[in-house]
C-alpha cells in the first residue's frame, strides 16, 4: 500500500483527492466481479461515487509507467 501511495504521489497532473480515491480503489480486495455495486459494498464510497470517478478521463498509462519504473529502479 505504501508503494502504491508513493507511485501516485509521483504523478504530476493528479489532484490529492483523486490520489486518495485511487489508492483506496486499488487497495480493495473484492470477491467476485468488480462492479460499482460490489465496489461500494466493500468500500466507504457509494456506487454513484465510483460511477462519477470512472466517467472522467484518467491517464492509466502514466500510473503503470510510474509503477514499473519504481519497481525497476528500487
Image (tube, grey):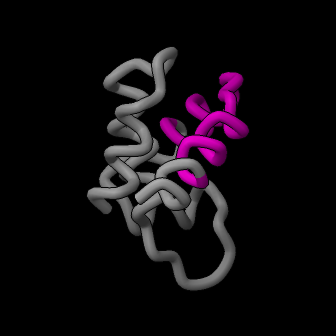
Residue lying at 55% horizontally and 84% vertically, measured from the top left: 31
Q: Is residue 60 left or right of residue 50?
A: right
Picture coordinates of residue 60, whole percent (x, y): 68, 38
Decide whether residue 52 is among the magenta residues: yes
Give residue 43's position: percent from left, percent from top. Answer: 36, 59
Q: Residues in magenta?
A: 49-68
Give the left or right position of residue 22, taking residue 58 as reference. Answer: left
Figure label count: 0
Relative to 58, residue 65 above or below: below
Q: Quadrant of residue 55?
A: top right
Front residue of 72 and 3: 72
- Quadrant the C terminus occupies: bottom left
Residue drawn where x is 49% and y is 36% of the image = 49
Quadrant containing the N terminus is: bottom left
Residue, far front: 73
Left or right of residue 22: residue 51:
right
Q: Quadrant of residue 63?
A: top right
Residue situated in front as seen by the camera: 45 or 69: 69
Vertical side of 17 occupied by 8: above or below: below
Name the residue: 68% across, 75% down. 33
Q: Nearer the viewer, residue 49 or 16?
A: 16
Q: Is residue 43 above or below residue 42?
A: above
**What kind of secondary structure does the magenta stretch mostly adopt?**
helix
Furthest-bottom residue in this view: 31
* Residue 33 sits inside the magenta stretch: no
x then y, percent, for residue 29: 45, 75
Amino acid at each position: 500500500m505504501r508503494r502504491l501511495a508513493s507511485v501516485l504521489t509521483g504523478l504530476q497532473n493528479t489532484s490529492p483527492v483523486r490520489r486518495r480515491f485511487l489508492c483506496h480503489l486499488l487497495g480493495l480486495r473484492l470477491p467476485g466481479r468488480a462492479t460499482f455495486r460490489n465496489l461500494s459494498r466493500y468500500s466507504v464510497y457509494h456506487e454513484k461515487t465510483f460511477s462519477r470517478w470512472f466517467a472522467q478521463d484518467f491517464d492509466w498509462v502514466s500510473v503503470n509507467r510510474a509503477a514499473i519504473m519504481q519497481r525497476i529502479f528500487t
